[in-house]
Amino acid sequence: MDRLSRETVVRLWDEHGDALVLYARQFCDAPEDVVQEAFLRLTQQTLVLENPVGWLYRVVRNRALNAARGRQRQSRRESGAAARSEPWFDWAAEDRLDAAEATAALEGLPMNQREVIVARLWGGLSFEEIARLQGASLSTVYRCYQRGLAALRERLDG
Amino acid sequence: MADEDRENDELKAFAEALRSLRPRTGQIDTGLRSLLAKDPDAIACDGHLLLCIRCGKVLPTEDRAADAALVRTAPRGKCRWLWPAACAAMTTVAAGLLVAMVICREGAQKGTVPFLRHRAAKIETAPQTRSQSRQLADHGGPPSTASHVAAANQTRQVEEAENPMPPGFSRWAVSRTSGSGQRILSVGDANLPDALLQCYFSPQNDASTGRKLASTGQLEMAEAALTNHDLLQRLLKLTEGSGDPSRSPNPKPFHVREEAL
């Protein structure tokens, strides 16, 4: 089996790289490393992937969860270490929403709602793909999306 | 119904506003993209990336391929210690040979038996069991003179077994060194011409003539000549036919064993 072509990998990075970083940021503090490892695994992948985007999200999710577990163990050992807080979005003058406020609002959401919103809005995944990714039903995913979006709007507009 | 539609529209507008926020990717954007734009074979290096942390450039593929080849060809495990072990073994063998050569040379200069014969004699004369050691301890000292003689005989047997001499010569030499009151035939006599032997074996001649002729070179030649059976026969005939017993101070001047022939 042939690997993915160089152009395909670069195109996937251009289209989904930032969204994957934001998606991995929901789980761990080192999303860049997780996404980089996922893309490197993609370049070494010998099997033909029907849905490379979904494969990337699944790899990023698994690796980010593993990194989060390792981070929790490390933070337990380093009890005095302060949690790292970086802005999730780049600031731009034409943005209608403030990037820092959006970050704070997203951080306040439950994990399942936050994951669905990020995967849907910035990742561009369908609800079916998100349901497969989370291992949940379609209705559950849609309900999480609606509730999370309403909560964000209430926090940012209110 | 209209409220729900209006709420959904507002949520969609809010979602679009959220979507307009650009996720921050940091340094990975430039580094990883430049990396992915390169040759995929350059990336796949056993899962490791040799990436410059300042400029994001990947180390050239040729260098990594050369490093990988070096790692593959480097000795590992047991092969790593092969040449030191071989060197140590050769040094040990050379040292052993040197010690053996020095001991043999010293033994030759002192006139004693070489090293290996000494060792063989020690093995033969050493107590082999605890009972023998206990017997030695009960007798209160070193072995007696008889045991010394037995050990010397064993040593001589070992010598003869290791360096066998011609049968005639060895027994002739034993005869030469054993008679105390007799006239002893020197091995140098074997190389003498018949006329000299006749003169030498005659009662008027004294032994000094034979000793005078028996230089070192003649002794060596005599040793070689004594291996000849015919020469021994001739010497024996000369010995038997030489001299008149009435004129001879020694009625039986030569002690030659029959078994020497």
Image: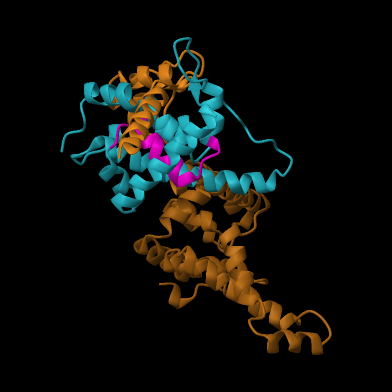
Q: Position of residue A95 (x, y in %)?
A: 45, 15
Residue B25 in view in this figure: yes
Q: Is residue A117 magenta?
A: yes
Q: Position of residue A147 (x, y in %)?
A: 43, 43
User: Relative to B92, is A59 on the left or the right?
Assistant: left
Relative to A30, does residue A11 appear above or below in the rendering?
Answer: above
Q: Residue furthest top?
A: A93
The stretch of residues the image draws in magenta is A107-125
Q: Position of residue B229 (x, y in %)?
A: 36, 64
Q: Position of residue B234 (x, y in %)?
A: 39, 63
Q: Nearer the viewer, residue A142 or B154?
A: A142
Q: What quarter of the picture does the N terminus of chain B occupy?
A: top left
> Which quadrant holds residue A105?
top right
Relative to B141, does residue A52 appear above or below in the rendering?
Answer: above
Relative to A48, does residue B149 appear above or below in the rendering?
Answer: below
**Chain A, hue in figure:** cyan
Residue B244 in view in this figure: no
Residue shown at 41% from the left, 64% from the top = B232
Residue shown at 43% from the left, 30% from the top = A21
> Which quadrant holds residue A55?
top left
Q: Nearer the viewer, residue B149 or A70?
A: A70
Residue shown at 21% from the left, 30% from the top = A4
Q: Is residue B222 magenta?
A: no
**Chain B, hue in figure:** orange
User: Relative to B256, is B130 on the left or the right?
Assistant: right
Residue shown at 63% from the left, 45% from the top = A74
Q: Residue furthest front?
A: B2
